[in-house]
Image: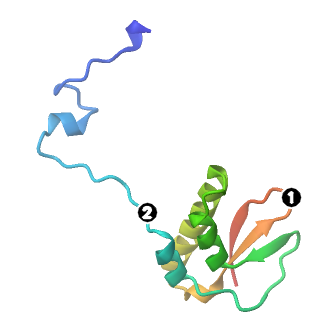
């Protein structure tokens, strides 16, 4: 195990923060649940039926993020779906109401659909 230890110094080009002492690293931050609630409007009614999946309301997904009883893997799945939906909106310049979230009955994975 001792053979695998790498000594960190300013000479190592891999660690840019060490070679540039004045450089600041900004930790990644993700928007909170309120941000997602403003981006996606509530799901008023089922617009399109998706086979083997149920349509989720973005508001309920955001509420699940605040619930302490929800497992970490479910929260990660919700965040990934919300980020993917936001990326789709920005990439194709779509209004938020065109995005739908569908949860597969068998796997409970959330996927993003464009209506």
What separation in Å lies between label 1 and label 2 (alpha carbons)? Answer: 29 Å
* Residue 68's disc number: none
Which quadrant of the rendered structure holds the N terminus? top left
SS class of the residue under badge 1?
A: loop
* Residue 60 x %, y %: 66, 75
* Residue 22 x %, y %: 11, 45
Q: Residue at x 21, y 39 (%)?
A: 17
Tell me the quarter of the picture where residue 110 sits: bottom right
Mark 2 Cα shell of 10 Å, populated few (<14), some (14-19), many (≥20) = few
Most distant residue in the left direction: 22
User: What residue sits right under mark 1 in the picture?
Assistant: 106
Q: Residue at x 19, y 34 (%)?
A: 18
**Is residue 50 at least partly visible in the picture?**
yes
Q: Exactly how many numbered labels are in the figure?
A: 2
Q: Nearer the viewer, residue 109 or 88?
A: 109
Q: Which of the marked residues, 1 or 2, is nearer the chain's N terminus? A: 2
Q: Is residue 9 above or below residue 67?
A: above
Q: Is residue 87 left or right of residue 29?
A: right
* Residue 2 x %, y %: 39, 8
Q: Residue at x 69, y 86 (%)?
A: 43
Which quadrant of the rendered structure holds the C terminus? bottom right
User: What residue sits right under mark 2 in the picture?
Assistant: 30
């Amino acid at each position: 195990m001792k053979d695998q230890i790498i000594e960190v110094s300013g000479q190592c080009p891999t660690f840019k923060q060490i070679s540039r002492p004045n450089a600041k690293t900004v930790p990644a931050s993700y928007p909170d649940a309120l941000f997602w609630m403003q981006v996606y409007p509530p799901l008023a009614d089922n617009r399109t039926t998706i086979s083997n999946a149920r349509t989720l309301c973005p508001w309920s997904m955001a509420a699940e993020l605040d619930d302490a009883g929800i497992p970490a893997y479910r929260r990660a799945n919700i965040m990934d779906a919300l980020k993917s939906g936001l990326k789709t909106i920005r990439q194709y310049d779509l209004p938020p109401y065109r995005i739908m979230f569908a949860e597969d009955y068998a796997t409970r994975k959330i996927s993003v659909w464009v209506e």
